[in-house]
Amino acid sequence: MIIRRDHYLNELLIRRQNGMIKVVTGMRRSGKSYLLLKLFHKHLVEEGVPEDHILEVALDDRHNLGLRSPDAMLSWIDGCLKDKGQYYLVLDEVQFLRDFADVLNSCLHIDNLDVYVTGSNSRFLSSDVITEFRGRGDEIHVFPLSFAEYVSACDVPVDQALSDYLRYGGLPYLFSCRTERQKESYLEHLFHEVYIKDLVERNRIQHPAEMEELLKFYASSIGALSSMRKLSNTFKSSKGVSLSVNTVGAYSKHLEDAFLVSKAVRYDIKGRRYIDSPQKYYFEDLGIRNACLGFRQLEQNHLMENLIYNELRIWGFSVDVGCVPASGTNMDGKASRQTLEVDFVANQGHRRYYIQSAFQIPDDEKREQETRSLLKIGDSFRKIIVMYDPMRPYHTEDGILVIGLKDFLKGPESMDQ
């Protein structure tokens, strides 16, 4: 089965021969190798690039053990360059290559060599790409399949596809699993035997059980604000384990570095400033989130919120949690100041959208709750409520777009109706 990843393929193509190292990042098993070694390779061949001008090495393959030596790799590359034609070098899982930064920076001195690499660990965050490659690294972050990509590859009705996606996520290998149990077993094995072990070994974690508990806390509290101090106190009171605020922060950073979770910080919309704490954490793949909890706690409203966050990021938006001040009254009837939350503030260039995730709006009280923060913002950017229930998109009297989840997931253009 061929799963199209046109968005990422186009990202590669517009960066061709730009004089930089194209670094493809993302969580393990998200499809980075498939993108470069299959889809990109196929495109180059169809375009007329000779096969011997496409140099590919899977460095996690023991057959290529000798090429993990920096000098051996450079010697091999030099031996492959037979003429002045354009060559393409693809190194998969480049972290296995010793002194890889020196090797790749050396490759930049070869005029007719265009370089692409993949990596799955914390050395491939955006900031580290800049550091390792002296400002010559160009990152392309690959997510698990978006819902649109997932639907394009499956042969079930959209409603069933959405239900499956919310449960099993978008890792491409799932299409090779024929039963629900196979899918669950694959995700649980991946979670425990790949992600957790990799995190513990790479970061020399002293309390692996506590780090896994932290991840489970994030999994069970999607959409809830968290602070490092509150989490530290929770571990002490409920687990009897003393984890300092710094340790909780370090563990959270390791989980981000492995692309398991992503942090959304709070943004004061009126004050136009960021608030460092508390923040929210979302899982990059819903199937891994559910496997973390043994496929329990499958609350559709929380999964839907996580899905909307992921789709916005896949579409290229930076996503924050919005807050806006509002006046109210306390139980004594006295005036008080409140802070209302906007689930997501999505920014891309000059574009901005304010988005609420509302699983259902059964009555006027819930409608007022979901719209109040949006109406308090007071600017002209598009304001949207996404509901799980299928419906024809419509605008409220106040100009808020109300749209069903399936329509929203069709793509970023859905937000401009």
Image (cartoon, grey):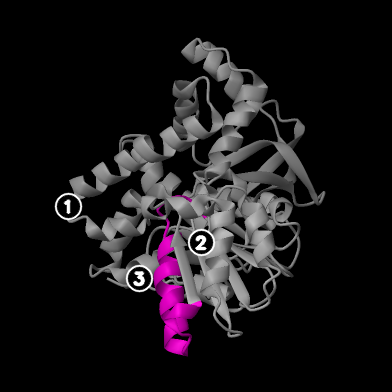
Return the disc, 3 or 1, that comes first in the chain's sequence. Answer: 3
**x, y percent for residue 247:** 62, 23
In the rendered image, the quadrant that contains the C terminus is: bottom right
Task: Specify the label residue 91 is tagged with.
Answer: 2
Q: Which residues are magenta?
A: 26-53
Q: Which residue is mark 1?
A: 179
- The structure residue drawn at horizontal position 43% and vertical position 84%, both measured from the top left corner, is 45
The amino acid type of the residue labelled 3 equals Ile
- Of all residues, the one furthest to the top in this rendering is 240
Amino acid beneath label 2: Leu
**Amino acid type of the residue that numbered disc 1 sits on in the rendered structure:** Thr
Residue shown at the point (23%, 59%) measured from the top left: 176
Give the Cα distance between marks 2 and 1: 34 Å
Q: Is residue 117 visible?
A: yes
Where residue 231 sits: x, y (%)? 58, 24
Q: Which residue is disc 3 drawn over?
A: 3
Q: Position of residue 376 (x, y in %)?
A: 71, 54
> Where's residue 3, x and y in %?
35, 70
Given this view, does label 3 or label 2 mark the residue nearer the observer?
2
